[in-house]
Amino acid sequence: MNSQLNAPIRVGLIGTGGIAAAHIQGYRQHPDLIRVVAVSDTREDVVLRLAAETGTQAFTDFRGMIENGQIDAVDICLPHHLHAEAIIAAAEAGKHILCEKPLCLTPEEAARVSEAVSRSGVTLMSAHNQLFMPTVAKAKEILDAGVLGQVYEVRTTDSFYNDFDPNNMGWRAKAATSGGGELIDTGYHPSYLLMYLAGSAPVGVAAMLSTHRLAFMEGEDSAQLLVRFENGVVGQLVTSWAYTPAEGTERFSVVGSEGSLTATANGLTYSVRNGETKHLTFDEVDTFSAEIKHFAEALLNGTKPIQDETDGINVLGIILAAYASAEKGTIEPVFSLARAESSLPV
């Protein structure tokens, strides 16, 4: 990791649609630490307009921006199927990387991404913004302190009524560009949250996928998973674009040998066996702003980000195993990074 950077870190934004607006707003909160100085998009009219609005350089080719944009890092906000190519190009040029989820789409891409980042020595942070929710940070603090004892079970839920239709869904409606359906999109969030709270790498997955309502999609609109982790924790995950969860459904929960905790969007309750119960509430935070600040501090201090390329690849492993499980009706092993790297051509 490079700790020789000076603030403000200069970032080139790759991709200007959708989630990029939330990222740009996040950078505006920390101009002394990190700022966008260049933007790229293949749509010339779009990128020129955004560059004018943000006072940045405009590029219609991200490779040209990486080579000529006078940047220290990139922020990748492209459609899913383009992530790996951009990561590898940035790493080979010695640029640090913040990449939206999913990190990539296949074990082969995972191996190439890992090898490129490792060889270059750059820092890659997987943009897992929900880890910056105050409830998640507090839950992790409680778990790391051993308050709940040995963790047995973790559950996560991320579902909502999605009003996408065939005319506005774009690349997300096609498995070739999205990588699947809802699970690899919104379902990526409860997957990395499940892994973060379990505190271990995933080893096996059993899954059921459904299309309840968005039948025009090539992929599923809902998914339910069981995940076993190396440390013995079993995770349960529910995610959907088809419906809003039933009243009282928790955002996440953890059960351990000495107690349990349950969280909603802005509240967390935990209790210890034979002890008192505590109820905590938190103000809402801009998780993208917090994520970008963390990325900047990791680069300036030369520290490991909250989740890096290994974590992003492990989350991809959960999702790919879930797709295989649903297709075969089996419990599927999660591919390991070592096995993915061994698939590279000699």
Image: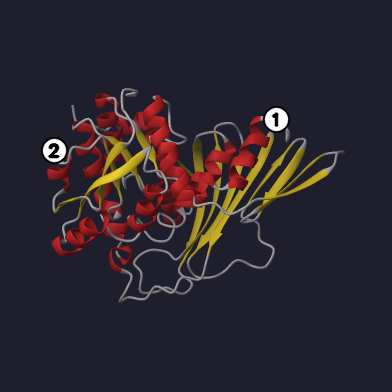
In the image, is 110 to the left or to the right of 92?
A: right
One can see residue 317 in this view: no
Q: Amino acid at mark 2?
A: Glu
Say the numbered circle drawn on residue 146.
1
Q: Residue at x 32, y 73 (%)?
A: 168
Q: Residue at x 47, y 35 (%)?
A: 306
In the image, is 169 to the left or to the right of 41?
A: right
Say the numbered circle drawn on residue 222.
none
Q: Say which label, 2 or 1, has the lower sequence index.
A: 2
Above or below, 187 relative to 212: above
Q: Quadrant of residue 345?
A: top left
| Front residue (pair 320, 117) | 117
| Residue assigned mark 2 | 67
Residue 257 is situated, as x and y percent measured from the top left of the image, at 75, 35
In the image, is 248 to the left or to the right of 160?
A: right
Q: Few, some or many C-alpha atoms within 10 Å of disc 1 (few <14, some 14-19, many ≥20)?
A: some
Q: Residue at x 38, y 37 (%)?
A: 33
One can see residue 2 in this view: yes
Q: Secondary structure at mark 2?
A: helix
Residue 255 is situated, as x and y percent measured from the top left of the image, at 70, 43
Q: CA distance from mark 2 to mark 1?
A: 47 Å
